[in-house]
Image (cartoon, rainbow, N blue to C red):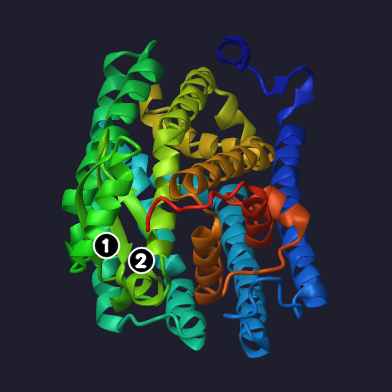
């Protein structure tokens, strides 16, 4: 509770706040520079080794395709750096030039009820952020993705998606914020616990309703018209203990030519969703192997483990947030001065925004740890899929096709992939699959 008690002055541990603020600013800039260095590292590595076709890819990747993969990856790197610099500059200007102070004071001067004022505080920031990102979204969709043959979206559909996303985000944010802010005002000393519980319930609720209410707002889902494939998928997942309610095809091709597949649903009853682009490019056994991998995540309880880990971290986050928000540390650190005519509770959204910025800095070094855990889970799921199918061959072929069709980088720098990749690099993944034992008879033929 030290931070709750100490901030009656502008020093902490005898360090003036201005020096702490300089340290925060420097840490953020250094993190961004480190990210750009990683991108440059990946770029130079691709330039050096990206002309070599990996073993096993010869059937689907020729030199022309490889050149296209290199060009696509390089353009994404350049675009990513440019958009990141743009967003970082805007954030730093907003926080460190007094604009955030003026914005907070303007909103509080409206003298709105606490919950209304706080909701508008977050909504206005979200709307401005969306508006500022529109040029980059348009460029990514209609320039970059279209140049490499992925984008199939019309401008009408893009605008429709934008407004649907804004509407859904507004409703969900308003509902969640209303509940959380009520708990903050009703339980000043324990709100961190009640809000954590609320967020947990809300997360499960969204996971449950998303396949039935939210996702159909953007895509059309129809039963797969291949009865043999549906029956095979159902029989395969039954071995894992998963009951498949439906095998659905999603009209992903109206937006993109990228391929994918995923599970939806909570508990032992699942829906399998296959991109129509995937059905057009993969054989039955390759699709079965991909779904078997997803079944491995369920059988190994990776989703539950991720939820538990996330909730533990979230609980710690909420308690630390409570300690910082109850103090004046954040206001003193960022030199926020909006007058003294407001009750402390009205400053809650101001402190939350500042806290999000700080937590982004603090959590950055843990990113490779979380990605390492994810790669361990992916390897376990791969091993399970091979055990279930009886051979790694079909999954290997599926991975090769997915990588080639999506123009995935076949030569990521090892340090870059270790820091950012949630999945092992495709070459590393295939090498591991080939090392697994192969049954003399597969389980799907």
Pointer 2 residue:
284
Tell me residue 30's x, y (percent): 76, 49
Residue nearest the viewer, comparing 204 with 384: 384
Closer to the N terminus: mark 1 or mark 2? Answer: 1
Name the quarter where the N terminus is drawn: top right
CB under 8 Å between callouts 1 and 2? Answer: yes
Q: In which image quadrant can residue 369 be found?
A: top right
Name the quarter where the C terminus is drawn: bottom left
Residue at position x 27%, y 47% from top? 235
Residue nearest the viewer, comparing 268 with 213: 268
Q: How many marks?
A: 2
Residue 211, can we see it? Answer: yes
Tell me residue 188's x, y (percent): 36, 14
Tell me residue 442's x, y (percent): 45, 53
In the image, residue 206 sits, relative to residue 424, either above or below, namely above
Residue at position x 28%, y 55% from top? 232
Residue nearest the viewer, comparing 266 with 29: 266
In the image, residue 197 sits, relative to residue 245, either above or below, namely above
In the image, residue 225 sits, relative to residue 5, either above or below, namely below
Q: CA distance from mark 1 to mark 2?
A: 6 Å
Residue nearest the viewer, comparing 109 with 270: 270
Q: Which mark is residue 45?
A: none
Q: Which mark is residue 229?
A: 1
- Crowd around label 2: few <14 · some 14–19 · many ≥20 (10 Å): some
């Amino acid at each position: 509770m030290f931070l709750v008690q100490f901030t009656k002055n502008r020093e902490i541990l005898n360090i003036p706040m201005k020096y702490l603020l300089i340290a925060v600013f420097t840490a953020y800039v250094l993190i961004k520079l480190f990210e750009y260095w990683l991108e440059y590292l990946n770029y130079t590595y691709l330039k050096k080794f990206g002309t070599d076709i990996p073993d096993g890819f010869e059937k689907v990747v020729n030199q022309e395709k490889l050149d296209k993969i290199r060009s696509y990856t390089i353009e994404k790197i350049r675009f990513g750096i440019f958009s990141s610099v743009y967003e970082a500059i805007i954030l730093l200007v907003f926080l460190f030039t007094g604009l955030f102070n003026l914005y907070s004071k303007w909103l509080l001067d409206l003298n709105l009820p606490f919950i209304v004022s706080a909701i508008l505080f977050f909504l206005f920031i979200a709307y401005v952020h969306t508006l500022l990102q529109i040029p980059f979204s348009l460029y990514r969709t209609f320039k970059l993705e279209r140049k490499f043959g992925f984008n199939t979206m019309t401008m009408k559909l893009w605008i429709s998606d934008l407004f649907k996303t804004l509407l859904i985000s507004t409703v969900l944010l308003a509902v969640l914020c209303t509940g959380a802010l009520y708990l903050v005002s009703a339980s000043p000393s324990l709100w961190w616990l009640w809000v954590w519980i609320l967020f947990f319930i809300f997360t499960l609720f969204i996971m449950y309703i998303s396949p039935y209410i939210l996702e159909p707002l953007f895509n059309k889902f129809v039963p797969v018209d291949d009865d043999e494939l549906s029956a095979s998928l159902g029989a395969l997942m039954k071995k894992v203990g998963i009951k498949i309610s439906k095998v659905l095809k999603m009209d992903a091709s109206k937006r993109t030519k990228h391929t994918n597949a995923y599970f939806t649903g909570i508990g032992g009853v699942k829906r399998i969703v296959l991109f129509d682009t995937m059905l057009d490019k993969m054989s039955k056994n390759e699709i079965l192997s991909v779904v078997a991998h997803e079944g491995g995540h369920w059988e190994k309880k990776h989703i539950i483990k991720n939820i538990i880990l996330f909730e533990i971290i979230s609980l710690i986050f909420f308690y630390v947030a409570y300690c910082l928000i109850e103090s004046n540390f954040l206001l003193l650190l960022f030199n926020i001065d909006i007058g003294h005519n407001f009750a402390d509770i009205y400053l809650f959204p101001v402190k939350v925004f500042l806290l999000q910025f700080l937590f982004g800095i603090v959590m950055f070094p843990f990113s490779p740890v979380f990605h390492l855990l994810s790669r361990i889970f992916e390897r376990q799921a791969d091993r399970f899929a091979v055990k279930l199918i009886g051979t790694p061959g079909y999954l290997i072929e599926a991975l090769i096709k997915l990588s080639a069709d999506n123009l995935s980088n076949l030569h990521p720098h090892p340090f870059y992939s270790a820091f950012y990749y949630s999945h092992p690099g495709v070459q590393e993944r295939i090498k591991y699959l080939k090392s697994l034992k192969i049954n003399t008879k597969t389980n799907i033929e």
